Every structure is written in structure tokens, then in C-alpha cells.
Image: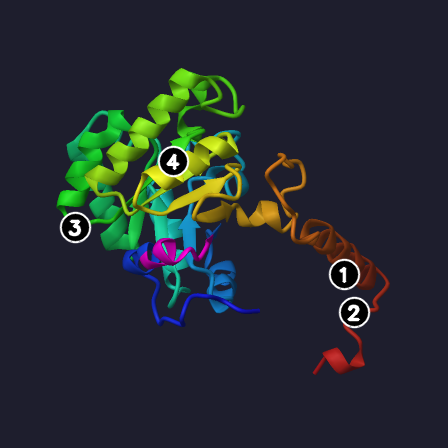
Amino acid sequence: MAYLQTDVTKVTTHVLQNMKQRGEKIAMLTAYDYSMARLLDSTKIDVVLVGDSAANVMDGYKTTLPITLDEMIFYGASVVRAISRALVVVDMPFGTYQGNSKLALASAIRIMKETGADAIKLEGGEEVLESISRILSAGIPVMGHLGLTPQSINKFGTYAVRATEDEEAERLVKDARLLAEAGCFAIVLEKIPAKLAELVTKEVPVPTIGIGAGSAVDGQVLVLQDMLGITQQFKPRYLRQYGTFGEDISNAVKQYISDVKTVNFPNEKEQY
């Protein structure tokens, strides 16, 4: 498999900026534990996101709201210990940055110091600019996130496509410009019309990473468990499953149970 990106020992925000300028797409996936992160890094994935989606796929919550800063730090540190090449970004969880820029900075500093991550990500536009600016002032790279912002699910009341109406679309473009001007090194665009995502990608000088935002963005991100087919009840239009590992794991465990029950495992070669 050929890559345009010349091999680098460590992906940085500067590398991502160069990739946008050259037209090379950025590949990003989530990870929450050491073993999976080590596998991802061996593939030369560009960015690993320790997403607050851990609330859903690791903790079993219905939304991302309950996950705590301590939990995100725990998952983040586990991932960072496995990574040598990819850029590692850790999500700031709900309640750690909204409406209080001093708390935002303190939360971001904890994430960076206690995980060793390369950057943080937070959701929102103009309403969180003060928090973004304060975090950036400490030298901490920030990835923005616009469109469907899962931490605002109670405000939206739905996970439907965002910015389909002109007013919201115009506000999203404005927010993207503001995030770029403030100093965000990249912006995630989630579940918005493809044409709008293309417009934003052309409007801002920083990389855009899409999830349900079409192909004209600068890169793509998916939740690892979703794309591997481990999360079996979640199949939105934008999700392409690259494996059926949920079924594979289930079948493997069933075979193991059968082998144990029938004393087929362990056999003579598998004992001392």
C-alpha cells in the first residue's frame, strides 16, 4: 500500500498541516487501551483519538456526558504508553471546559501532564473561544469539533445531521473560521452535509477531519469498535465496517466453551 506521506518517526501538528497542503488525506481512529493502540500505531495510522466515545463503547453509557476527567486521563495514559508514531489527541469531557476558561486550562494541563498526549480536543465554536484561547496560551495544541457535538445531545435532542438549514450552516462556517484564527490545529466536522464540509475545508487553512461529512474533507475519523464490527447495534449511513470482529469474537468464545465442556482443551500438547 502506497502512502504519499514520507515516513516520519513522529506525526505532529506540523506534519498534519503539510499533509493538507499536499492534498494527502489524514487517517484517524479512536483507541482507549494499550493493546489496541499498539496495533494501530504499527499500521502507521496518522492520528489516534482517545475519544469521549469511550463512555459508550468502554463504559456502556448511552451518551458521552457521564465520563469523567479522571477516566479520560486513565484511557489516555494507557494509549500513550503504546504509541510511538501517531499523534495522540485526548477529548476533554463534558463539564471540564464549558463556561469556565480557568477550569478548561486546568483540565487541559492535567490531561497533558498525566497522559503524555500530544493535544486535546473539545467541542463547540464561538461559545468556547475563551477556553480555547486560554488553553492555547499554555502551549497546548487544540483540535476543534463542530457540527454534531455529542456533548450537546440534550440541547439538540437528536443525533440527526446538523447544519442542513442556511442559518446553522452559516454559523458553522463562521465558527470554523474563528477556531482556525484562534489557533486550533485541526477541526473535526461531524455529521454535516458533504457540500458544507467541502466549503469549510476550502475556507480554513487548517486540516478538517470528517465523520459523516463526505469525502472532500482533509481526513476521516471513525470509532475503532464501529469500523471493526464490534459495536453491532450502531450502523449509521457514514459507517463502513472493515471487519466482522464482533461475530468472530463471539464464535471464538463459543468454540472455546465447547472445547472446555468436552475436554477438548487443553490437549496433551497444551499441558506440562
- The residue that mark 2 highlights is 265
Which mark sits nearer the N-terminus, 4 or 3?
3
User: How far apart are the alpha carbons under marks 2 and 4?
Assistant: 57 Å
Which mark sits nearer the N-terminus, 2 or 3?
3
Q: Place residue 146 in its image quadrant.
A: top left
Which mark sits nearer the N-terminus, 2 or 1?
1
Q: Residue furthest left?
A: 137
- The residue that mark 4 highlights is 200
- The residue that mark 1 highlights is 256
Q: Position of residue 211 (x, y in %)?
A: 50, 40
Which mark sits nearer the N-terminus, 1 or 4?
4
Closer mark to the observer between disc 3 and disc 1: 3
Q: Position of residue 202 (x, y in %)?
A: 37, 40
User: How far apart are the alpha carbons under marks 2 and 3?
Assistant: 55 Å
| Towards the viewer: 166 or 191 | 166
Which mark sits nearer the N-terminus, 2 or 4?
4
Q: Position of residue 172 (x, y in %)?
A: 36, 27
Closer mark to the observer between disc 1 and disc 4: 4
Q: Position of residue 31 (x, y in %)?
A: 47, 52
Q: Amino acid at mark 2?
A: Phe
Which mark sits nearer the N-terminus, 3 or 1?
3
Secondary element at tag 4 = helix
Secondary element at tag 1 = helix
- The residue that mark 3 highlights is 139
Q: Amino acid at mark 1?
A: Tyr
User: How far apart are the alpha carbons under marks 2 and 1?
Assistant: 8 Å
